[in-house]
Amino acid sequence: MTHLSPPRDRLRNEPEPRLGAVKLQQLRFLAAVVQNELNITAAAAKLCATQPAVSKQLKLLEDELGFNIFVRTGRTLASVTQPGERVVTHALKILREAQNIKGVSDEFKHAGRGSLSIGTTHTQARYVLPPVIKQFRSKYPSVQFHLHQGTSEQLAEMAKTDRIEFAIATGSQDLFGRLALLPCYQWHRRIIVPRDHPLATVRKPALRQLAEFPIVTYVFSFAGSSSLHETFAKAGLRANVALTARDADVIKTYVRVGLGVGIVASVALDGEEDADLVSLDASHLFPVHTTWIGFTRGGLLRSYMYDFMQLLAPHLTRRMVDRAAACETQEGVDALFAGIELPAR
């Protein structure tokens, strides 16, 4: 059978691929607006377009679909409608696949070039990632690295809108349903007090002793209950939380001024910088925590992304990452790593 090919001029002048009457460019504009918290001006700057051009394309998209994607207050986008949420979800999937196609090309033509955006908590960014990123940048100087900090809820929103390739956090797994979460390492909480504090000479404080003092610790997640409060409640005690903060350095500051007993991640302590504080073991009081790294299922992983994961956690070899990526559910990922002893920090 003879297949007729269109003339070269027709191919050259072919309009941008369309999804029905929906243009791929419109989906890019839609994604940019959502990723910039519905700020059209910021989205236009990111797209190197004008604000009227972005607004026009969004309106044309809504006209084609036959319903509003956004709730508007005057000229301001106030929120995304319920059907609009579904459109955004599908648009991001389409754009992700388009990016995967480009990524395949880049992987063959420019293996050591690209970008990597990571969302993580302050503790990881401040205490764990610096040596990892230093090694990574030494190996891949042409990869642009973007580091975003936030709470678990903020990281989940970044992942939902495809603003990051990796999320690195501890707990709150229910917020990251679209991601495959791979365990990196485990850590315990530690208690910190000034050297003149009554607990400073207690090698392993009991929970009832902790309950006698105000506590300064991390901000609790808005999703689900706090493991700290649960631990006290199971012992029939109540945690007297005086202050919560996202930043371990802020917690240490308030411990130093005598506001209360600090409870922080073991990875957040520095022997030299925190020499004025007494650090006490709390592994007998609170459960062990696992820090994970997550990426979107179905996304393309570039070679340098595999290397970053292994720099962070040596057991995350390319083979293990690919096996985890092939799992359809998080339960499958958890089963894959069930027999692996994670490093402690």
Image: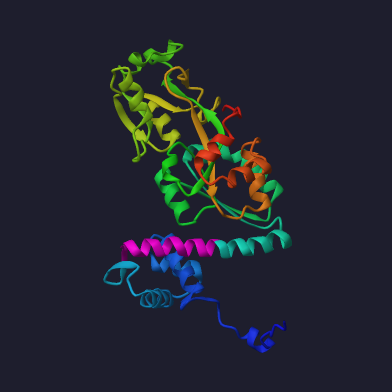
Q: Residue at x 72, y 84 (%)?
A: 2
> Residue farthest to the front?
1
Q: Position of residue 64 (x, y in %)?
A: 39, 77
Q: Where is residue 52 in the image (x, y as percent from the top left)?
A: 40, 77
Q: Which part of the image, by quadrant, shows the N terminus? A: bottom right
Q: Where is residue 298 in the image (x, y as percent from the top left)?
A: 56, 54
Please state which of residues 22 and 276 is positioned toward the viewer in this rendering. 22
Is residue 258 at least partly visible in the picture?
no
Is residue 98 at least partly visible in the picture?
yes
Q: In which quarter of the image is residue 260?
A: top left
**How many dots with numbers?**
0
Residue 282, placed above or below residue 202: below
Q: Which region is colored magenta? A: 77-96
For the stretch drawn in magenta, the main secondary structure is helix
Q: Residue at x 31, y 68 (%)?
A: 76
Residue 80, placed above or below residue 341: below
